Image (spheres, coloured by chain):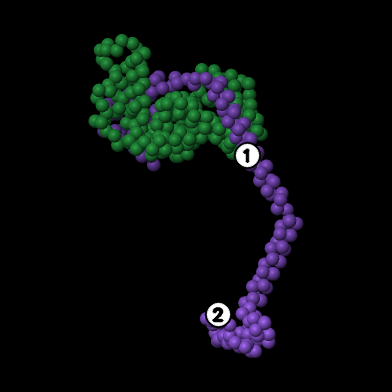
Chain colours: A purple, B green
Amino acid sequence: MKTFEEKWTAWLDDQLTGSELSQFEASLPDKAAAEAEKAGSKKLGELLKRELSAQPLANEEFFSHQLRERIIQETREPVRQSTGETATYRWWTVPRLLWVGAASLAIFVVFTLGVMHEKNPAEESQYLTQILNARVDPVVSPNATVSIFEVKQDRVTVLWTEGLQSLPADYAAK
Amino acid sequence: MIQTEATLAQSDVSELDLVKRCQAGDTEAFDALVTRYRTRVFGMIYNMVHSEQDAWDLAQDSFLKAWKSIGRFRGQSSFYTWIYRIVMNVTIDWLRKKQVKGGGTEFDDAIQLTQVDPASRTVPKTEALPHKAMERDEIRVRIEKAIAQLSPEHRAVILMKEIDDMQYHEIAEALGCSIGTVMSRLFYARKKLQNLLRDVYENV
């Protein structure tokens, strides 16, 4: 089902025929006005054709030359791009991918084991003992030993000294 | 001029052969197609944008796009209709972008006749202008101004129909819309131009 606009356009362009034409013309309320409109439309078409159709392309050969240059330029660029892509693609061969994958897995395993080992204090002694010798003068107290016992779980630290003649003057337990 | 170019090229080699050679990467064949259609394409774009420089650039872009996508041309329509579709896409896109940048008054179809400056009447009933050339220039300016008030889609249909004598189905194919839409757009474009240019075509 054509709309009025479609029928009107077809009528202006003499594209309506037969019963469609007669039905449309019968439906027009003012046939004389419609005919005048049609004549005006023809004149408009002629005016547009006469005034607008003669727009020459200046420098036609230069137009084609410029286009050829652009096409050559455009053709080269994708070649360059595809060459780069091929080089990248070639580096990632299947054996290389396998080697890289295996190496990555090995590094991951070593790193994971190392971290797990550090984080597992259960295997260590419950008491962490540090022997401090730095502050004991071996001349003054040759048999002196200072030990620290630390229970991390209970947050307890015990300082154990033996064989000291006297505490160093500058010693201060903090 | 256009017909001469086309006729000469057609006598040398058929369009389909040229297209096939283009699809095989033959730039000379594409050059032949460009030679055949460059004037018509340029003229159509010029009538859409009313600027020689812009028309040149858009025609270049259209042909370049055609070259890039020539592999997708299946020969279901004529090459001219196919390239017209590219031309229209490129030009309408450009006009839309320009409209957005420029504030969008140019294609306002809602502009009424009362907003047209009465002083812009250029077709005197008496001999006010000394030279016919000047008169024609002014008529042309008047027509261009009237066309500039149409939306890009309305411009496209009226120009393809009236200037290039294209059939409804060819216009529909070139614009990627239905024949009904083409006819409807023609209806409104003609109404608008008749209102704007009645004094011109009645008096010339």
The residue under label 2 is which amino acid type?
Answer: Asp
Q: CA distance from mark 2 to mark 1?
A: 78 Å
Residue B189 or residue B65, whichever sits in front: B65
- Work out whether A139 lies above or below B43: below
Q: Position of residue B176 (x, y in %)?
A: 47, 39
At a point 59% along the width and 28% down the height, the residue shown is A69
The residue furthest right is A95
The residue carrying mark 2 is A170
Instruction: Classify the position of the C terminus of chain B by image quarter.
Output: top left
The residue carrying mark 1 is A78
Q: Position of residue A133 (x, y in %)?
A: 65, 80
Q: Position of residue B33 (x, y in %)?
A: 58, 26
Q: Local crowd at mark 1 within 10 Å, few (<14), some, or many (≥20)?
A: few
At a point 66% along the width and 71% down the height, the residue shown is A112
Tell me if residue A84 can be seen: yes
Q: Position of residue A103 (x, y in %)?
A: 72, 63
Instruction: Please tell me in which quadrant of the rendered image residue A39 appears.
Output: top left
- Work out whether A35 lies above or below B99: above
Residue A61 or residue B75, whichever sits in front: A61
In the structure shown, which secondary structural element does the residue marked by tag 2 occupy?
Answer: loop
| Nearer-N-terminus badge (2/1) | 1
Residue A27 or residue B33, whichever sits in front: B33
At a point 27% along the width and 33% down the height, the residue shown is B112
In the structure shown, which secondary structural element does the residue marked by tag 1 occupy?
Answer: helix
Q: Chain of mark 2?
A: A
